[in-house]
Image (tube, coloured by chain):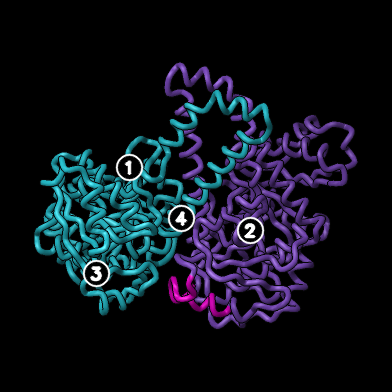
Chain colours: A cyan, B purple
Amino acid sequence: MMGGDHKHLTTLPAVANFLAYRQDAILILVGTPEISSQVQHAISDAYQERWHWVEATQEVHMEESPQAALKNKKDSSMRRAIEQVRDGHALAAVSAGNTGALMAVARFILKTLPGIDRPAIAKMMPTLQNHYCCVLDLGANVESTPEQLCQFAMMGSALYACVFQRERPRIGLLNVGTEPIKGTEISKKTHEQLSQLNTDGFHFIGNVEGNDLFSGKADVIVCDGFAGNIALKASEGAAKYIAHSLHATFKHNFFYQILGIFAYPVLRHFKKAVDPRKYNGASFLGLRGTVIKSHGSADSLAFFYALEQAYQEAIHQVIPYIEQKLHSTPLPPTVNSTASQVE
Amino acid sequence: MMGGDHKHLTTLPAVANFLAYRQDAILILVGTPEISSQVQHAISDAYQERWHWVEATQEVHMEESPQAALKNKKDSSMRRAIEQVRDGHALAAVSAGNTGALMAVARFILKTLPGIDRPAIAKMMPTLQNHYCCVLDLGANVESTPEQLCQFAMMGSALYACVFQRERPRIGLLNVGTEPIKGTEISKKTHEQLSQLNTDGFHFIGNVEGNDLFSGKADVIVCDGFAGNIALKASEGAAKYIAHSLHATFKHNFFYQILGIFAYPVLRHFKKAVDPRKYNGASFLGLRGTVIKSHGSADSLAFFYALEQAYQEAIHQVIPYIEQKLHSTPLPPTVNSTASQVE
């Protein structure tokens, strides 16, 4: 309840709406004592059977270092929430807090799955083909070895297959061209290793390019966290620029403003259709439990969608599915991991 | 005249329009004999003093390797055009042809500027602040050393200062966070070296993120060709997705279609305002001459803008300005260049 720029002012209304929306969901709300009475008042009595309160005495601040959060905040709301997953009380933890601290605490408490070196951050993006594309890693690691990128591919594919009930999702490797010889040494090696993994349950389609994040050519796109983070943020920047230009055009002169009144219902519909809040909620993949990260600046609608992402992963039993896939598909063994981690 | 998907069918109308638009421009048109009579007929007699025809017997195909183009196509239109620059007959060469071949031939014929290891591809992007942002490298090199990234920063800054008459353009380093400790080892080292270059003529503002390609926070953004290429293409993908969604919303139902008729003049204006063809024309920076690359799929309007980019760089004497800047600002010496080149 304590994460994000506006803490419970954001998370609380989202929780109240989510309880109404998903009648089979039970929420464990973790927060500091100061907000407990507000939580009590904000949630309808009708749902009192479907939520519990877990108290924590500390909270991790947005600018705190992962190391400090791990060492000094042993009773933080973030840590208590993740412990609920470890202890089997919750199927997923959701937080809008400090990304680096959340990743560090989640790794420490939950540990990585067998065969996985490092977790990755995955997100579903909308595409021109009316289906999602799962992109990972979006910034958990700045550099990754080919072996780690294969692990990401496997996990992304399992997540996609599980949530969308789609067999053999098409996996693409993000690169600067489609030919296998394109890119860095790591790109070329990863292409080679992914090609060798191609089996009944694994479908590598080769290199894809930046625009394929939205083209629908692949269901899963694998990249290192550096390229992924930059691609995601550049897309957000482009989207904002276009939205700004559209708005400015309708304000361009008085006549256009009048026409804007006519077009208003369509523009409202459009705004809703491309609302980035609907895609809030990134998955930390590779842990022995589901952890969903909401954007820190999320409002309550965006946080609602992060809860929904957690719900989807919980009901589709993503973690056991990934474990089974990791067990049945032999991944290339990790040589020596020199790749570094950011968050 | 021979480059791009539709060759002279695209370049010829662009040339005819450009001659009418820039009355002080003289164009040297390079092509194979088959098209010479078509060129003659397509250009108004009024401009006959302002264009010359240079014949080449070969053309470089889009799928040809740079090595093959260099070795086997010594009389290609591409090579002849670049030779016009080398020999002082032209102030710039423009081509919509094979990017890799164009870069290889340009490096071979023109050579790099003193102090520059490798050329970079630079492009002007529109921003929320109504000024451009020059982004480089966009794919000439897949990996770059900190020293090479400093060279790119210097050249991008000089190009920006020269074309927009702006002193001390703000230079940002593309990264996954704004703190100096973010990113890869190369990011951190580059941050350090760029900070040390900060002088009267050089203005490094620190790390920027993907969304800053469009935010206007920086005038010049430096990155390696891998991240730059992915950022650019992801932005194009996002823009296309949003345009598609807007179009689909106005077709959503009959009522919206009617409202779309009312909004038509505004939407047409908007489409023009964000038309990506206006930003066609990437600069190969770091050569002893101006070479502009048009998108291969450019239509004649887009190719017109590539000609305009060449015109701007020529009249603002970008090359002598970059040379002077390289001379007056001591760049960090290149240690050993292990970075590889793609195109």
> Which labelled disc corresponds to residue A132?
1
Q: Residue tagged by mark 4?
A: A233
Q: Is residue B68 visible?
A: no
> Which labelled disc corresponds to residue B134?
2
> At 24% across and 53% down in the image, what residue appears?
A39
Residue type indicated by callout 1: Tyr
Say which element carries label 4.
helix
Position of A262 with respect to A67 (left or right) is right
Q: Of callouts 1 and 4, which one flags the residue occurring earlier in the amino acid sequence?
A: 1
**Rendering coords of residue A112 (x, y %):** 19, 67
Residue type indicated by callout 3: Ser
Q: Of callouts 1 and 3, which one flags the residue occurring earlier in the amino acid sequence?
A: 3
Q: Decide: few, some or many residues near mark 1? Use Cα within 10 Å; few <14, some 14-19, many ≥20.
A: many
Q: Are marks 1 and 2 on the same chain?
A: no
Circle count: 4
> Which labelled disc corresponds to residue A288?
none
Chain ID of residue with mark 2: B
> Is residue B188 highlighted in magenta?
yes
Say which element carries label 3.
loop
* Nearer to me, A337 or B189: B189
User: Do callouts 1 and 3 mark residues in contact (Cβ within 8 Å)?
Assistant: no
Q: Is residue B5 visible?
A: yes
Q: Of callouts 4 and 3, which one flags the residue occurring earlier in the amino acid sequence?
A: 3
Spatial CA distance of label 1 from label 4 is: 18 Å
**Rendering coords of residue B48 (x, y %):** 88, 37
Discs 1/3, front = 3
Q: Which residues are magenta?
A: B179-193
